[in-house]
Image (cartoon, rainbow, N blue to C red):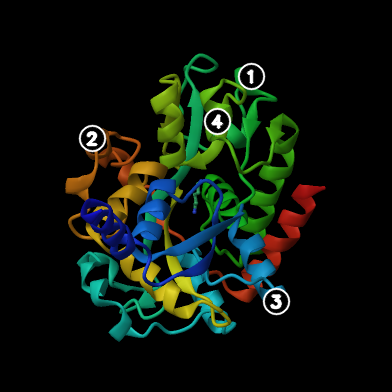
Amino acid sequence: MKKLLTTVAILWTGAAQAEGELQLFNWGDYTSPELLTKFEEETGIKVTVTDYDSNDTALAKVEAGGHGYDLVVPSANYIPIWREKGLIAELDMSKLPNHGNIAKQWVDVPFDPGRKFSVPWQIGATGIAVNSDAYSGDINTSAIFLDTPEELKGKVNVTPEMNDIMSLALWYVGGEPCSENPEELKAARDALIAAKPNWQSMDYGMTEKLAANDTMASVYWNGAVFRANLKNDKVQFGYPKEGYPLFMDSVALLSDAQNVDEAYKFIDFIMVPENAALISGYARYANGIEGSEEFMDEVMKTSPMVNIPPELAEAGEFLPTCSAKSLEYYTAIWTELQK
Ligand code: N2P
């Protein structure tokens, strides 16, 4: 009897103290299930994840209202937009004892100086996945999707992330991201429209398809390509020499969040190095939390798909937040491209 009582007592104290729920709105296949289980075990808070496939769809859904989400994970170039629209709330630092774990270089970032509105989730690069069985030429180039080599025609996927694709196309034609120059924009538009007949699809979820040889090439993100590569070593990642986007996706608290206390607990939880390592261990991107590397497996520290080779690093750039004028051009071109 005594033994039974002790067991019950252990179960009782080990059980969730702060029951609750949390609604996380995040990019598809980007959240470690292990992280969620650990969070639930430690706090009793159950996290529901809803997926999105681009910054623009996430923004549109939240702007429309009635969404019920507490946290969102926009890319750096979108954080100022969410903030200006009043969609994300300033963080109460007194509720975030782990805020000091953000690595120094990721605190005073141009998109959120002092990290008052967002904390790091994952960091990576937008480049090109190519299956080396299908194509053996140079893959460090946007020509793979903009001047598709014969072998890859009809086999290339392009992700539905407008800013990534517009930036790659602008660099490719000799322009710059967020251009307001009509000639540059027209050149980018022409390159995209001419290239599209050679594409297979414009979809988000490519990791499994790349691993299974269902898609032979894709504009895609390094971590997801690394995951495919770990299952199928023919899947390689190219960093376009003409220029490619670096991204940093960060977690922000929605202004109309219903589960605010739970949201703070989660934000603080992901800044624990061991927990940040779980995030990276699943989606295979770097993160911005000091000391998380020591909890990661060896391949994360050595793979060129996480650690950009120095000779290819120079062409990578964090995307700026485009002006309204340039976004008008972007949207017009993007809309035409979807037809
Ligand atoms: C990949 C998600 C990448 C997000 N599944 C790119 N900002």
Q: CB atoms at circles 3 and 1 under 8 Å apart?
A: no
Choose the circle earlier in sequence order: 3 or 1. 3
Q: CA distance from mark 3 to mark 1?
A: 46 Å
Q: Nearer the viewer, mark 2 or mark 3?
A: 3
Secondary structure beneath disc 3? loop
The residue at which mark 4 appears reads as 208
Q: Is residue 245 visible?
A: yes
Residue 148 at x, y = what percent? 62, 28
- Tell me which amino acid carries mark 1: Glu
Q: Hey, what amino acid is under mark 2?
A: Thr
In this view, the mark in front (3 or 1) = 3
Q: Nearer the viewer, mark 1 or mark 4?
A: 4
Q: Which residue is mark 1?
A: 150
Residue 331, horizontal then vertical, whole percent: 71, 62
Q: Secondary structure at mark 4?
A: helix
How far is disc 4 from disc 3 in space, using C-alphas? 32 Å
Q: Which one is in front, 135 or 208?
A: 208
Where is residue 28 shown, x and y percent of the image? 56, 49
Residue 154 position by quadrant: top right
- Residue identifier under label 2: 302
